[in-house]
Image (spheres, rainbow, N blue to C red):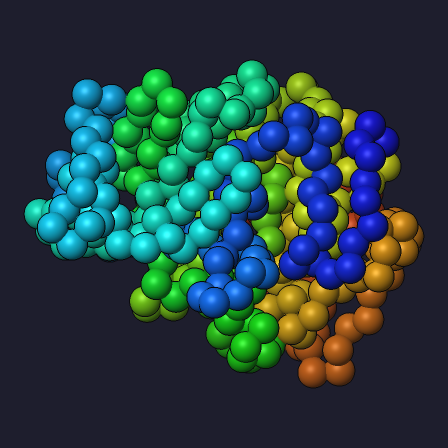
Amino acid sequence: MATTLMSIAAPRSGPKLDNTNSNNTNHNTIRKVAHGDEKVKPDSQGQQSAAPTQRDTIRESASRVHRQKSKNDRALVGRYKLIRTIGTGNFATVKLADHLLTGKAVAIKIIDKTDLSSSSRRKLSREVRLMKGLNHPNIVRLLEIIDTEKIMYMVLEYASGGELYEYLFKKGRMTEAVARQTFRQILSAVQYCHQKQIIHRDLKTENLLLDENFNIKLGDFGFANEFHDGVKLNTFCGSPPYAAPELFLGKEYDGPEVDVWSLGVILFKLVSGALPFDGHTLSKLKERVLRGKYRIPFYMSTECEKLLKKMLVLNPAKRHSLEVSRAKKYMGVT
């Protein structure tokens, strides 16, 4: 495999499978800053908000960037008042902000372009371009781009419910009824992307956010890319516990099938509260993924087990497509 992979202690903090330049700007670089604590951990980046007004259409407008101090010493970016930092990384900071006219909460990802490599700049441009074309109720919306010579501001929806990862960590596994409803929304979002010839390539519970009504919002398109029939992809990226076996083997892939594998891992975690494949080191994790063996909890329904066995298939050519997966009895579609 072309990538040098480090050992991992846990899925939450594990390294990326990525053979691109390490100076990436995707949302996985964001870390939550705990109040009064120097330690940091990954965060959902607060990328959600209520539906935008008509004026909140996507635009590039460097001329309208006005960073100034208000009376309460809070900075302004365009039409937004920055409230507080909710995430930070090597090249980006995420701020919770309010729209000055509507008061709607948004998340603004502030990216310092001066330290980005040329490949990271191309990756950022691709992320923005792909997100502009997405409009789905279960996908984080890119509301606006404010671009200057040195700084890019990505105005995103804000999800007050936080990460699905955090929910499962605090609440434990879901009932199958809730898991089925949640997974149906996740499938809908990913299938929408695939229909637009876009693969996500970093599907995991950390990148699935919840709004105030417990609806799913898929975020973090930093590793997303377009795919085309007959054209193989060779960038090996993602989070190891959710990565398909062909990525561990360094093989080229078509695209959608790697997302299907990750979705199988997510479904397992929703129902069981744990990962089907895990290990204290990356080599141990790789060994278990390539074996393709995992334990089915006694409480898991037969229909759920059947669906998992069609998604977590070692041979990518034999994995269920998302269309077939959504039509399965477990998903409530007959």
Q: Residue furthest left?
A: 101
Residue closer to the observer: 123 or 86? 86
Residue closer to the observer: 59 or 177? 59
Residue 176 appears anywhere in the view: no
Up/down of 94 relative to 235, above or below: below
Residue 210 in the image: x percent, y percent? 41, 62
Residue 133 in the image: x percent, y percent? 37, 30
Q: Residue furthest bottom?
A: 299
Number of callouts in the render?
0
In the image, taking residue 176 as reference, residue 215 lies left or right, namely left
In the image, taking residue 147 as reference, residue 28 lies left or right, namely right
Up/down of 64 relative to 84, above or below: above
Question: Which residue is found at the position 48% from the left and 27% from the top?
Answer: 124
Residue 208 in the image: x percent, y percent? 50, 56
Question: Which residue is found at the position 58% from the left and 61% from the top?
Answer: 39
Quarter location, residue 192: top left
Residue closer to the observer: 253 or 123? 123
Up/down of 118 relative to 245, above or below: above
In the image, taking residue 224 as reference, residue 231 lies left or right, namely right
* Screen quadrant of the N terminus: top right
Residue 228 in the image: x percent, y percent? 59, 22
Residue 276 appears anywhere in the view: yes
Question: Which residue is found at the position 35% from the left and 49% from the top?
Answer: 95
In the image, taking residue 269 as reference, residue 313 lies left or right, namely right
Question: Which residue is found at the position 40% from the left and 46% from the top?
Answer: 94
